[in-house]
Image (spheres, rainbow, N blue to C red):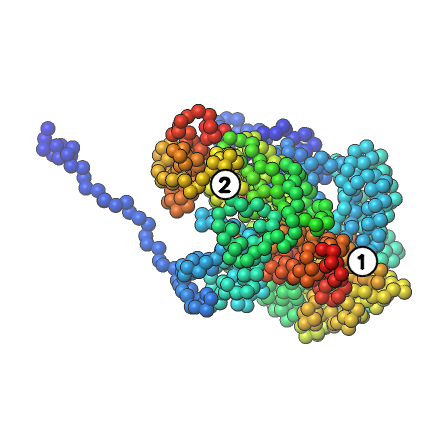
Amino acid sequence: MDLVTLAPRATPDERTAVDVVLGAPAGRWDGGERADPEGGHTSSGGHAARERRHLLLPVLHAIQARVGWISRPALEYACRRLSIPPADAYGVARFYGLFSTTPRPPIVAHVCDDVVCRLAGAEDVCADLERAVGPAGEPALGGEATWLRSPCLGRCERAPAALFTVAGTLPETIAAAPVDAAGIVRRLERTAAGRRLVPARIDPDPDEERLANVRRSVPQAGRPGLRILHRVGIINPLSLDDYVAAGGYRGLRRAIEVGREAVIAEVTASGLLGRGGAAFPTGRKWAAVAAQPGQPHYTVCNADESEPGTFKDRVLMEEDPYAIVEAMTIEGLATGSSRGFLYIRAEYPLSAARMAHALAIAREAGYLGTDILGSGQMFEIEIRRGAGAYVCGEETALFNSIEGKRGEPRNKPPFPVESGLFGRPTAVNNIETLVNIPGIVADGGAAFAALGTEGSRGPKLFCISGAVPHPGVYEVEFGASLGDLITLAGGVSGGHELRAVLLGGASGVFVGPEALDLQLTFEATRAAGATIGSGVVMVFDDRVDIVATLRRVAAFFRDESCGQCVPCRVGTVRQEELLARLANGRPNGSADDELALLADLGQAMRDASICGLGQTASSAIESAFRAGLVAFPRQAEARA
Amino acid sequence: MSSEIAHIFSEPPARSTRIPGPPPVPAPAEVELTIDGSLVSVPAGSTILDACRARSIEIPTLCFLENLTPVNACRVCVVEVAGARTLVPACSRRVESGMDVQTASERVRHSRRLVLELLASSVDLSTAPGVAEMLDAYGADPARFGPAAPPAPAGERDAHQPGHHHASDGASAATVAQPVTVDNDLYIRDYAKCILCYKCVEACGVDAQNTFAIAVAGRGFDAHISTEYATPLPASACVYCGNCIGVCPTGALMFRSEHEMRAAGTWDEAAQARTDTICPYCGVGCTLTLHVQEGTIVKVTSPLDASITEGHLCVKGRFGFTFMGRGGTTAGDGA
Ligand SMILES: Cc1cc2nc3c(=O)[nH]c(=O)nc-3n(C[C@H](O)[C@H](O)[C@H](O)COP(=O)(O)O)c2cc1C
Ligand code: SF4
Ligand code: SF4
Ligand code: SF4
Ligand code: FES
Ligand code: FES
């Protein structure tokens, strides 16, 4: 392969951004000078350069963060360094929502207009912003800043939310919630005037304020009896000593003591099912990876958390980071892998910072590295950041993303336990799944299995948002009903009637008030044709505009489809068009025609799409019709 | 000259008349499965598509081609496997012992019909061989999504930012319609006809050419085939092998000669003779199929099953044919 790069040279800034990630070029092959001037015209190092393909996303992040967009010369320099064809790298850069391949002002406010933030007035925020600084995407404030709409930022409990990205030599990414238009404009103006947004810091709140602040996201924080959240708000998330004093690392010590098989046996006995949405038995997954011949195996932690309405994994990473490090280490030892990747969505800067800090401290203290706690066993964890793509939460898309490719899901089989990251056996788990692990290993699977119901063991986190006075992450033992959860969050907001609940997020199912008694277990929701999904409980009262909500859900899937397969790529577009006709009362043909169209689309997307995104893209919308929350007006037939 | 020497000159030592071949490969084990109710036995490692074709069971395909790695993206080949939650793509799914496959169930026909309706409502399939028949066979009605939206101006679709779009009012059905890209003398790219089957990307990449001039860029409905920064082909890595044209199932990639003749209304496939010959340029000996209309070569392909080419050629064999005609500077003279 010949790399054809014809554009002008990258600017010093752009080259520096790339070189900070990759180190200085070694020779001609990777964009530098000929390494050995006496060596004639031969050149070596192509294989070595291509081996580093997985650094493409970190490199693109570095350019985007330093320059504010990815120019052709910058991309081509990155391509020379990594020996990637420019068309290929361009395809990757154009996949991710947070990268721009056209000039973009350095300061950007990404304003969430997704379902929960809409309830909290996001559309008003956007309208005010448009008046104050101009239309979304247009340069404002002397070309220094702009704003863009964004899907759910994972801060729904404090909606409406925004994310600020500031490019430059000291780039910043800062999430803020709740926000209003005036506040956003003020931040943009201050930053444009050369001031830093807020000191970039990962420090936690002072001890005396911590609990009160954490309670804004986790209202139960500090209550006795919690199993997943028991350290949240109590310990200083930077302090390894705090973590150990609160029972941390008992699990890893025991894992080393009892060995791989015993760990997998405990996890299997616990009956733990994956909390990332697919509810697959964790023990079975680990056993399958451990049994794979050959090395290496990989451990991947899925912290992409982009399902609208989900924010539990963020809270765990921010407030209890060592638990995730410990759990991944146990998983690594149990599945025979010595390398782990933690894939965090780019919209979670504080999570990434706290996790990076915890990794460094744990490494220093011998909890990670080549000789973990003197056991002679080895495990390392690397953080990788997403770049604005919901579909990268799908496990095989996530592997492709880590490998430096477009985040397109792979066809299964083969399953990740056989062929996952870099084509190797891979155990991939959700953050919440993992946080259960140290306790299971330390105290035995039986204690965990004693909690919950027959088909849903243990405790579970739910993300309650929308029309409740105290939205946030709540922990309950499996078996609690939908009504119990809404009561925990303070009931439906003052004086309003419950209209509907969206269970499981955008890919979930709407249920009406009659479902308050529904037990939120895997088995009961399945039997009721609903789902727990990622634990989303989005509450809507009688003020909600259901059609507008459905249109936002449809727009989300249209935006987030990777585009590989026809049912999802075109089906999500047709579904959105149909809802637009529902909204403006101009159906194509009769109401029945439209309903048939929706059902046909839904069935084909469910049956023939490659991945879960397409398979569930019609779920919430069809369920809203089923639950009678919306209907095509019959009288509209006359007008058609 | 002694007799021995005369012998050496006149009779070369006896040689093996046959170049030794590789040792025989053991025949793969057979796998038994049920297809549409009848028990069949096929070699292990076959795909469901292989198994069906061996029994003359018709499965439509669009993104599959024998000489490329299956990407299983179009989903028109889906079949129903008992016990599977979703349908599975026949083109890439390997047979397993005891599999129970339905190739024409209601569920299968439904998804195929929808895939065809979705494609035909968004893409110009007028030059895609065999697709009109598929639409008929499945009773597809692409018009049910409403009238087609007007075409986008050149470059507009490519510029869409991933994760952002303008919500439609639903009055018309979005399409990929856009002007044809004509940026070189040899072939044109009409992405209004692109079903995004990934075949051209594969042919340009590791499956044949290893040039990597094109890739999929953008996301979702805005995903499209592109060079880096939509650079015109002459400034890209493209070497004009035309292998992407050879694999394109819809005519989105087309010889410029064919494109211009179609525009002029002079393209007449029925009047074309196809002649197989060997490429005159080098010692590789690729099989060429010359498509000749009224004494003029109008396009060159290579048979998919030609052992040397597997359908792929280089720029000389593909486009270097004008010396055969009347000369002059018509398309085919070089970039
Ligand atoms: C479109 C899509 C998005 C997903 N997003 C996430 C996610 O953000 N976090 C997650 O843990 N799992 C997500 N999943 C599920 C993963 O594919 C996978 O099942 C999970 O990470 C496995 O971990 P678990 O067994 O611990 O649940 C997603 C799946 C799909 C289809
Ligand atoms: S279902 Fe959608 S997101 Fe999943 S592979 Fe197909 S196009 Fe991509
Ligand atoms: S003509 Fe050859 S090199 Fe050019 S894009 Fe097509 S396959 Fe690639
Ligand atoms: S241009 Fe042709 S070969 Fe390439 S993706 Fe489109 S339809 Fe397929
Ligand atoms: S942060 Fe806006 S909807 Fe979740
Ligand atoms: S032919 Fe099998 S998915 Fe396209």
Residue under the point 52% across and 55% down: B136
Front-lying residue, B318 or B299:
B299
Find disc 2 in the rendering and name its residue: B244
Q: Label 2 sits on what residue type?
A: Cys
Chain identity of mark 2: B
> Which quarter of the figure is the C terminus of chain A placed in?
bottom right
Label 2, ligand 3: CB separation under 8 Å: yes
Q: Label 1 sits on what residue type?
A: Asp
CA–CA distance in space, label 2 to label 1: 48 Å
Q: Quadrant of residue B109?
A: bottom right
Q: Farthest residue in the front direction?
A: A638
Front-lying residue, B236 or B168:
B168
Residue B327 sits above or below residue A536 on the image: above
Q: Tell me: A217 left or right of B21.
A: right
Provide residue A450's location: percent of width, then percent of height. 70, 74
Q: Quadrant of ligand 4?
A: top right
Provide residue A33's location: percent of width, then percent of height. 57, 29
Provide residue B12's location: percent of width, then percent of height. 18, 37
Front-lying residue, B178 or B148:
B148
Chain identity of mark 1: A
Judged from the image, the secondary structure of the residue bearing numbered disc 1 is loop
The answer, for residue A219, to whether it is visible in the render is no
Query: Dot 2, how many residues are within 10 Å of its Cα: few (below 14), some (14-19), or many (20+)?
Result: many
Residue under the point 59% across and 39% down: B226
**In the rendering, which numbered label is found on residue B246?**
none
**In the rendering, which numbered label is found on residue A545?**
1
Q: Tell me: A179 left or right of A103.
A: right
